[in-house]
Image (spheres, coloured by chain):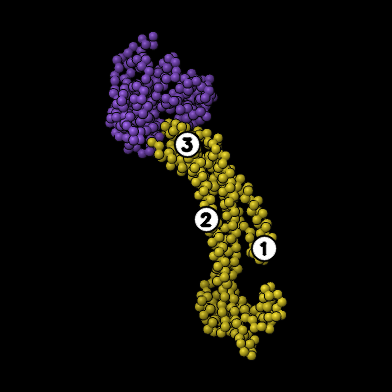
Amino acid sequence: MLFKRRHSDLPLAGDATSRFLPWLVALMVFLSSMAVAGAFVIGAVIERWDRDVSGTLTVQVLPAGGEHTDAVTEERVNSAIDVMRKVPGVLAVRALDKKRTLALLEPWLGSTEMVQDMPLPRLIDVTIDPESRIDLAEVALRLGRAVPGASLDDHRVWLSRLINLSRTMQWVAVIVVVLIGMVTSATVVYATRTGMAVHHGIIEVLHLIGAHDDYIARQFADRAFALGIAGGLMGLGLAVPALTAIGWAARRLEGGFLPSLSLPVLGYVAIGLLPLLAASLAMLTARLTVHGTLAKMP
Amino acid sequence: MRHRPRGENIIRFDSVGLRYGLGPEVLQDVTFKLPAGSFHFLTGPSGAGKSSLLRLMYLGLRPTRGRVVLFDRDIAATKRYELPALRRRIGVVFQDFRLLDHMTALDNVALPLRVRGVKESEIRRHVPELLSWVGLADHLGAKPSTLSGGQKQRVAIARAVIGRPDLLLADEPTGNVDDHIAMRLMYLFEELNKLGTTIVVATHNELLVQRFAHLPRLHIEHGMVTTLQQEPAAVDDLEAE
């Protein structure tokens, strides 16, 4: 049997620790679940954004001044297309006509009748092989020299700031989980030391009749694991409905404004493992604490 | 239990001193040897340091100076993880019994065997047998809180001897029992001694010492130990009293 109940000489079941530690671990697992879920959702969003834009570039050609503005601009667009097609790694180059450009502006400006006579920049959508290592700075320089008023936008300037923010949030989530782990460990250290003080007489007898330190430490560790797993499962039991409710609320928000905020499968696995992780941490901490304390005995 | 040739030293103290914290020395320049298979009384007035000396012998304390050699191992040079193996060769009867109140008499006596990883089937066979021998066959499942002082003492003695130790240290083992039980326990110790166990019985019961006057004694007074060889005594005469 995997979790065969092992013999214990110490009456740890009646300790005050047995009452408060599971609740504390439950709270810690609940908070960790929130942080882990947040980290995984943000990670998935970053990956999606990155994937969506890593294969595309946009060339912007400013409208030419003068009498034949449309014809000159069209000529510049064609030149820019020629330049981009010669770049190795470029898969497709497609100029957006004025109608399509106006359609892109429509969600922001409402009716486009006001602006359809205005000189608008022309956009060229360039699809590149995401695996290719194009020197975008060099391409931008070549484009600027060959076509007056043309510039290259690889979306990364604005996206990188967004990704930086997201990554910072992800790291904050990781730090939160680490801090929660440290608080849990500190509590287990305190609980174990209290338990050792309460059962000092029994521990001394075991020590004097020839028990190895690990024989005693194992009993505290087993108890800490049992309390940790019980608390962890309680915490998971609270986290699952909470995360389901947040996911349901997020799906109602999305509607094209936010990217999909679904938790990847790996996120579910990580959250599912949190009770085991918390229990293992409690077990290891208890074991090390007992060893550290017993090392002071003769 | 290992079979050691009688005469080899099982314990040797060389100029051992002990003080608690910054207090005065409770043991000073203690030097003696206990040959394997010997049986000694440890005598002396209350507060003379008998219990401290026993604690040094059962490795419950480290000396502040001097050299303790136990089973041919210099304790100061012995690694900490090697000490449990030495402690398993020592049986201790504590003055205050130190029985575990949440356990039955049977489980208390089984403790040294469980610590050694002895199989439960072996434990279930040997422990009731020994408890019967000390007159507690009807109290196997009794918790210490329900036992009398004498019964607790017998459980403590059974726990000390269940592992057939090479060295048995008993601190006032007959302090809470009537004369009949005291004699019975002393005979148990003598039987163990005949089987090769080295025995030290700390007591301030002069009558008991006189009854076993053939046994040598370590006498401790003002923290100093002297070895006294008693006159061979007529134990039978004393028993007849």
Supply the letter of whichever chain is purple. Answer: B
Q: Secondary structure at mark 1?
A: loop
Determine which residue is flagged by label 3.
A197
Q: Is residue B230 above or below residue A54?
A: above
Query: Residue at left 57%, top 58%?
Result: A39
Q: Amino acid at mark 2?
A: Ile
Q: Nearer the viewer, mark 1 or mark 3?
A: 3
Q: Amino acid at mark 1?
A: Glu
Give the camera-side residue of B118 and B24.
Answer: B24
Q: Chain of mark 1?
A: A
* N-terminal label among 3 and 2: 2
How many other residues sit within 10 Å of disc 1, few (<14), some (14-19) or many (≥20)?
few
Q: Position of residue A34 (x, y in %)?
A: 59, 54
Query: Viewed as shown, does residue B218 lie left or right of A97?
Result: left
Determine which residue is flagged by label 1.
A254
Query: Residue at left 55%, top 68%?
Result: A160
Give the camera-side residue of B83 and A189.
Answer: A189
Please identify the quarter of the rendering in which residue A37 is found.
Answer: bottom right
Q: Is residue A43 above or below residue B206?
A: below
Q: Secondary structure at mark 2?
A: helix
Real-space Cα separation, disc 1 to disc 3, in angstroms: 55 Å
Q: Position of residue B136 (x, y in %)?
A: 50, 20
Supply the letter of whichever chain is yellow. Answer: A
